[in-house]
Image (spheres, coloured by chain):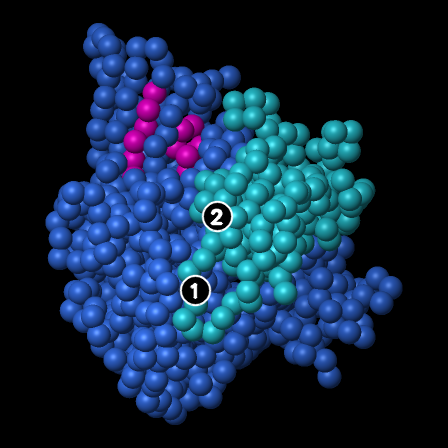
Amino acid sequence: MLPLLTGTAAAQPAPATPPTESRTMDMTMEVNGQVHRLALDPRTTLLDALREHIGLTGSKKGCDQGQCGACTVLLDGRRVLGCLTLAASVGGRQVTTIEGLSRPEGALHPMQQAFLDHDAFQCGYCTPGQILSAVACVREGHAGSAEDIREYMSGNLCRCAAYPQIVAAVQQAAPQVERS
Amino acid sequence: MPDGIGTDHQRIDGRAKVTGGARYASDVMLGNVAHAWLVTSAIARGHITGMDEAAARAVPGVLEVFSHRNMHGAVAETEFFAKGGYVGSTIRPLESDRIWHDGQIVAMVVADTLEAAREAAFRLQVEYREEQPAAGFDAAGVEVKAASEGGFEDPEVGDADRAYGNAEVKIEAEYSTPTQHHNPIELFTTTAHWVGGKLELHEGSQFVHGLKNGVAAQLGIDPADVHVVSPFVGGAFGSRGSLTQRTALVAEAARRLGRPVKLVPTRDQGFTIATYRAETRQKVKLAAGRDGKLQALVHEGWEVTSRPDPYKVGGTATTARIYACPNVRTKVNLVHADRNTPGFMRSPPELPYMFALESAMDELAVALNMDPVELRRVNDTQREPIKGLPYSSRNLVGCLDAGAKAFGWERRNPAPRSMRQGEWLVGWGMATSIYPTHIGAATARVTLLPSGHARVQTAAHDVGTGAYTAIGLAAAEGLGVSLDKVAVELGDSDLPPAPVAGGSNTTASVCNVVMKACDEIRARRAQGQQGAIEVYAENVPEGLPPEAIGKLYQGRNALGGGLEGGKQAMAAFGAIFVEVRVHERTREVRVPRAVGAFAAGRIVSPRQAHSQLTGGMIWGIGAALHETTEIDHRTARYMNDNLSEYLVPVNADIQQLDVIMLDERDSQANPLGIKGIGELGNVGTNAAVANAVFHATGTRPRHLPVRIEQLLG
């Protein structure tokens, strides 16, 4: 069984062989402090729920199989892959996406600012995942050295290869993120 | 100091990118959108004999199953881009039951939801009659043709074979480079939306005017009725330059269903529905006198392509012209196999061919007992040897000097296996980098408001290259305003056309035309014109015909410059120095540091240029040690079509990288003296790594990527 049950959502029978019945499942998720009530196909991933149903497209789909890190979001402050997390499983927990790190016209989060300062991205597609991963990397205590940062940021691929700049950005932001 | 060319500045599109506000193609939210899912071929050659759609159509929410049964004739045949057309592959999926390659699109399921489309796609039963495919070089049934049959000019001068026979010192070796896939992190998504008979396309593109005109030709509609929107592109590297066949299919599906259709293909589908870097095999012969001066250079290459399309890598156009050598003979051969059509991938000709030449130069240096840096210095030239054209500027020697100094090259013990640290064998290697300087016809509209704010509009593309910022800096300089007052609009086919983001031409092509518009605005202000001033400018670089602008509006590129045409040869140069460590027992290879020194004309936006060159060098390290698409030669199918098994460099693979940008003024190349840098960094880096591995181990790697198994035994 999939870990579907959170909140008041009712259990559904296991997926049947054809014909599959059309059905949705009521679910609740709290994203960036805002509660969303959704009725979705139970197979919907957290990533697709964010992008296709809530309209938060900052989280990116790069592989949909947990290999690239572009969909990294924070779940109760820990980094998870949105493409490998079912939307129905996050009820009662707090999801933070790139849109939730700072206010639209306000000051940037120190990690966002550091990425900007160090030109730690090029095309920018992996960047939301990199930044959320970097915040978690610091909070996990894995930003003590360049070597540690390189190791613990290696789950986030950057095809433009801004890796040295990413390490510099994490080093710049780490003291402020540790205090926050 | 006012902002302008050379100002160190953060990316002007950076805030959007770090906040999630940058909207890539699949981020566009449209009402009532239907979702498409592709079904791709399980065989590489043969025919579809049956398709059972019942189970797929029974999935609730499925709207249509598109296949050759209902799409035959929907997408018109168009020319291969290299023959003046738009498409990167002339293989039309869903046109017939014929299968040309592994992973060819055989059906597209469209449903109300992503989940339903995916389920239905997996329930579609396709039956095939399979024929034995030819996967590549060694397979029976491939067809080998000289590239010259398709009009490629094999550079040649003097009598290379006689000179080789007479020379005192000579080497001869064979090299190979693998199939590689671009793997931009953004998938090959397309969203098509018809509004009042007009098609709106959201697709990451390196050439929005090409996409607009190409899709119009495929669907038989007026190009004026196609609008391509692509302000942000999640990596491209050549993969989004010419049209893929998926776009027209999605557009046709949206037209028939009367609602927007969004396709987000899977990562593995991206390996077969777009292009890739062709696999090569190469033979190089070099001969020199005892003084190291080259007397003969022979370079022959074989490249895999598809059955119908003559895609050519053709890096001999560069390797024949880089060093002073009086006798050169080259030849390029195309090997047609049952594969999808390859295409441009970052430094398309130079990356594989310079690997072979620069490895051979290292082998020659060993044979001569000469320092490899000195060998490049001895053979430096200010004229390319084939036609004797002068280089507009060339400072390879400056790069060699600066790179060697920063790296500490003089401390190198030339003997292989002579340097070590603990259990690690240490090797130092180097290579030359070169990338031809291209510039194309371009147009732009610049508006200066009385408030001092300015707007630049041109359908150029920022695929991560920093084009927004570079173009903004050129306008800031041209108008004498600060960069924060300049708004730059790119990546939209409603804007005045600019060339493909390829061949590293964008900065030169677009900054020159923007400057032209700015000059006109300043002139009008000097004449007393008041109020907002809007100027549209066109620029046709020297050597291109006036009709280049008209062709650009038709989505056809006209790029000038480079090494072959005109009255001069134009290129950017670099020297790459790499340290590797090879573990004595496991043969694991690490790259603790690398230095690249580059002379690439006027650097417009230094911070972004630094990122481009660093990223390029990391691509070179990846090409040397990691990247290869594995092919099952029995079935001609890809075996590692995902990001955990197709290895690309990760953060932990990269340590210290230093980039040096030499000051270079080139008034001959173009008015602003700009050379391209996006593809310079990875050229030669692969050879520098391999040469360092030889120095560390005494084993010469001639086949990329260099993996542990090559170094054992």
Q: Chain B's colour?
A: blue
What crowding class fits label 2: few (fewer than 14 Cα within 10 Å), some (14-19), or many (20 or more)?
A: some
Residue stretch rendered in magenta on the structure: B454-473
Query: Is residue B553 magenta-colored?
Result: no
Judge left or right: residue B65 versus residue B430. left
Query: Which residue is at a point 74% across and 72% down the rendered structure image?
Result: B587
Q: Give the labeled residue for mark 1.
A: A21
Q: Is residue A23 visible?
A: yes
Return the mark for residue A90: none
* Subunit ID for the residue under disc 1: A
Query: Which of the 4 image quarters holds residue B692?
Result: bottom right
Judge left or right: residue B534 versus residue B342. left
Task: Name the residue type under label 2.
Answer: Ala
Query: Is residue B465 magenta-colored?
Result: yes
Query: Does residue B138 lie above or below B227 as drawn?
Result: below
Query: Which residue is at a point 45% across and 45% down the rendered structure image?
Result: A53
Chain in cyan, by letter, is A
Where is residue B165? Give x, y as percent.
46, 82
Q: Nearer the viewer, residue B308 or A61?
A: A61
State the SS at label 1: loop
Q: Give the labeled residue for mark 2.
A: A39
Where is residue B632? Give x, y as percent.
50, 83
Q: Are marks 2 and 1 in contact (CB under 8 Å)?
A: no
